[in-house]
Structures are given as C-alpha cells and as structure tokens.
Image (tube, grey):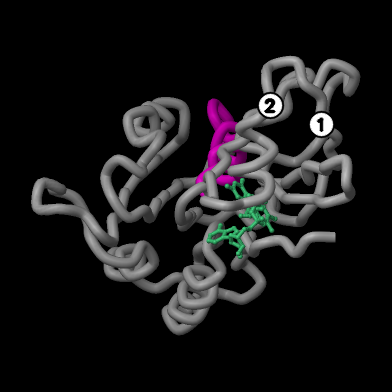
Amino acid sequence: MPDAGALDYRPGQYLKLLSRDGRARSFSMASVPRGGRVDLHVRRIPGGAFTDGILPQMKAGDAIDVELPLGSFFYRARDYRPLLMVATGTGLAPIKAILESLMDDPDCPPVSLYWGMRQPEDLYLHADIPAWGERLYDFRYVPVLSRAGAAWQGRRGYVHDAALADAGDLSEHAVYLCGSPNMIRDARAAFLERGASPAHIYADSFTFQQDG
Ligand SMILES: Cc1cc2nc3c(=O)[nH]c(=O)nc-3n(C[C@H](O)[C@H](O)[C@H](O)COP(=O)(O)OP(=O)(O)OC[C@H]3O[C@@H](n4cnc5c(N)ncnc54)[C@H](O)[C@@H]3O)c2cc1C
C-alpha cells in the first residue's frame, strides 16, 4: 500500500476490498503491521465475484481500494489466560497476525492452536507453523482434518471436537474462534458447556458478503 504510510491496525482485524462498482468483501490481515505491506490469506470461492473474478485478474502494481481497520477480533492482553485458538480454513489469517504480535513477548500466555481443514493439502502453512513455537512462550499446534485419506497420521473429525477432547475445564481460558460460522456456533456452545466464560470468548465469523 504505497500511499498509506505505516498501516495502523490491531492484529486480528480485517479490511474491506472495494471494487469500482461499489461491492465490498472482507479479508483479515494475516500479518502484524509493518510499513505499508499487509498479507492476506484468500480462499478462492468458485464463482466468487472477488476471489475467482477480480483478484485473479489483478497484476502486481494494479490498484484496488481498501478500507481498514475493521472489527473487534484482536488479542486482549488484559485477560492474561491460556489461549485456546480454533480456526477453520483461512480463519487462520487473523490468528496468525495475533500470534506474530505475541512472538518474543515475555507476557505471551500459553497457546494451543487447533486448525481445521478437510485434506492434508489444504493445510497451506502446515510446514511453517511449528517454527512459530520457537518464538512463543508455550505453543501447541494441532491440525485436524475432516476428510483425510488413510495416510494421514494426525487428528480427524471436526476441529472443535478435537479441542474439546483435549481440554479440561475451560473456565480459566481465553478462547479465540475464527472461520466458518457453523464451527463458531458449535464451538461456542460446546466450550460454554465446558466452563468457558462468555466474556472470554472472541469470535470472527467468516460470513459471506452480499453484493451492495
Ligand atoms: C470479518 C470477515 C473476515 C474475513 N476474512 C477472510 C479471510 O481472511 N480470508 C478469506 O478467504 N475469507 C475471508 N472472509 C470471507 C470472505 O469475505 C467471503 O468468502 C467472500 O464472500 C468471498 O468473496 P467472493 O466475491 O469471492 O465470493 P461471493 O461473490 O461473495 O460469493 C459467491 C458464492 O459463494 C458463496 N461463498 C462465499 N464465501 C464462501 C465461503 N467462505 N465458503 C463457502 N461459500 C462461500 C456465497 O454464498 C455465494 O453463493 C471474511 C469474512 C468476514 C465477514
């Protein structure tokens, strides 16, 4: 973003891409603010106006308007508690930005990250994520696949079920949920039953946008 100067946003927040004809789509910043550059993780939706239409047509140097910062999904340092982070798909993006902001931070709480996808090849950052733990105080990464073939040695099923199976009482945790609206609905209900406090559950639901 060459004209923007230093970007100012809280890791976890999102931006809107705006098309010339007035449509808008939301994407979460996947990196901490660093100068005028931002990373996004974009899932291509077959037939999607932006992700399958406008974005693949763009070349380096083309311009598109953006609006930021938006949203209230960001890390609350004041409630220092172990973090249980659960993402599906590109819901990893804002969680990655939050975790980047906690790297080398002496006040980083213990973090468990559960990332749900369908197949092993969907785990687009799988090889990189374990190294995040070298710069986080206490980091556990658990990928969970819902449609893996026989070769997959890791966890299977729904990602929030895997997190629940490993968790004990959640009353002292802060829970960050991001990705599919169904996962967020089901995880919230299940984690509340396990003692999670409604005041310490933060969620960013990747709903689909209406044109206009
Ligand atoms: C706060 C917020 C942050 C988001 N951050 C990200 C992000 O970081 N990365 C990312 O990839 N997405 C993110 N999304 C979701 C993304 O904005 C939508 O998927 C968007 O609709 C895609 O735009 P499109 O123009 O390509 O598809 P559209 O033209 O909007 O949709 C085309 C068709 O596909 C369906 N559709 C759209 N999105 C999905 C989906 N995710 N799953 C299944 N069907 C879908 C629609 O219902 C419609 O029928 C975010 C959404 C919100 C609300």
Between 111 and 79, which is closer to the camera in this rendering? 111
Q: Which residue is depicted at the point 77% across and 54% down?
A: 71
Between 7 and 150, which is closer to the camera in this rendering? 150
The x, y position of residue 133, in whole percent, is 39, 32
Which label belongs to residue 140? none
Q: Judge left or right: residue 40 versus residue 139.
A: right
The x, y position of residue 61, in whole percent, is 75, 15
Please tell me how many numbered marks the rendered image carries: 2
- Regarding residue 76, the answer to whether it shows in the image is no
The x, y position of residue 41, in whole percent, is 56, 38
Magenta-colored span? 91-106
Q: Which residue is mark 1?
A: 64
Q: Which residue is depicted at the point 25% across and 59% down?
A: 147
The x, y position of residue 116, in whole percent, is 38, 55
Between 125 and 131, which is closer to the camera in this rendering? 125
Q: Amino acid at mark 2?
A: Met
Residue 27 painted magenta: no
Q: Which residue is mark 2?
A: 58
Q: Judge left or right: residue 83 versus residue 79.
A: left
Q: Which residue is depicted at the point 36% across and 62% down?
A: 159
Ligand 1 is found in the corner quadrant, namely: bottom right
